[in-house]
Every structure is written in C-alpha cells, then in structure tokens.
Amino acid sequence: MRIASVADVKTQFSAYLKECQRGPVVVTRNGQPVAALVPILDEDELEDLVLAYSPRFRAILGKAGRQIAAGEGLSEAEFWEEDERASQAAQP
C-alpha cells in the first residue's frame, strides 16, 4: 500500500492510477487520509464499490440486520421492494 499527498497525486495522477493497479494508494491531506485509489478489475467490483458507499443501500442492510437479530427476516423480494421505494423517495 502506497501513501501519497494530495499535491503529489494531483501532479502525477496518471502515475498513481498505474500504481493503484499494484495495490491501494492512500491519499493524504495534512498527513491525514482523505481518499484511496483502488483498482477496479471488472463491472462487479465497480457495483460492489458503489453499493458499499450508498447510504440507501447501507440503510436497507441495517434494517435487514435488525430484523434478523429480532428473529425476523427480509426476503429478497422485500429487499428489492424496499430499494425501489427508497429510490423513488430520493427522486425529486
């Protein structure tokens, strides 16, 4: 794993994109991590990454986790219905 400042990444962005193919590059500002460059090898990885940072998806997973802990469950159909409702609610 490589660590680089925002200034370095800004001036050598193409080089850091190549570097991240070998492993993550942590980008820092004032010595604190603020971002990471990670390789995306296929469309499934891209989808996983997008979902991992989706507040809506994380809320649905949280609800499912609470239901499972309470002895209940969320079927796949219910999951996608909840996703659709949240998607429609998020649209202007």
Image (cartoon, rainbow, N blue to C red):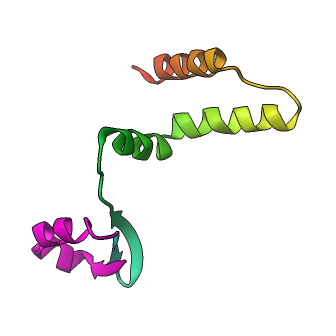
The reply, left or right, for residue 69 in relation to residue 65 is right
| Residue in the picture at 39% in, 38% down | 47
| Residue in the picture at 11% in, 75% down | 11
Position of residue 34 measured from the top left corner of the image (x, y, whole percent): 39, 69
The reply, left or right, for residue 54 in relation to residue 78 is left
Q: Is residue 8 magenta?
A: yes
The reply, left or right, for residue 76 in relation to residue 83 is right
| Residue in the picture at 51% in, 17% down | 84
Position of residue 86 measured from the top left corner of the image (x, y, whole percent): 54, 22
Please report the bounds of the magenta region as a residue range. Answer: 1-23
Q: Nearer the viewer, residue 79 or 63?
A: 79
Q: Is residue 5 magenta?
A: yes
Q: Quadrant of the N terminus?
A: bottom left
Which quadrant of the view contains residue 25?
A: bottom left
The reply, left or right, for residue 13 in relation to residue 58 is left
Placement of 34 over or under 51, stated as above or below: below
Placement of 63 over or under 31, stated as above or below: above
Q: Nearer the viewer, residue 66 or 18?
A: 18
Position of residue 16 measured from the top left corner of the image (x, y, whole percent): 19, 71
Numbered-mark total: 0
The residue lying furthest to the bottom in this view is 31
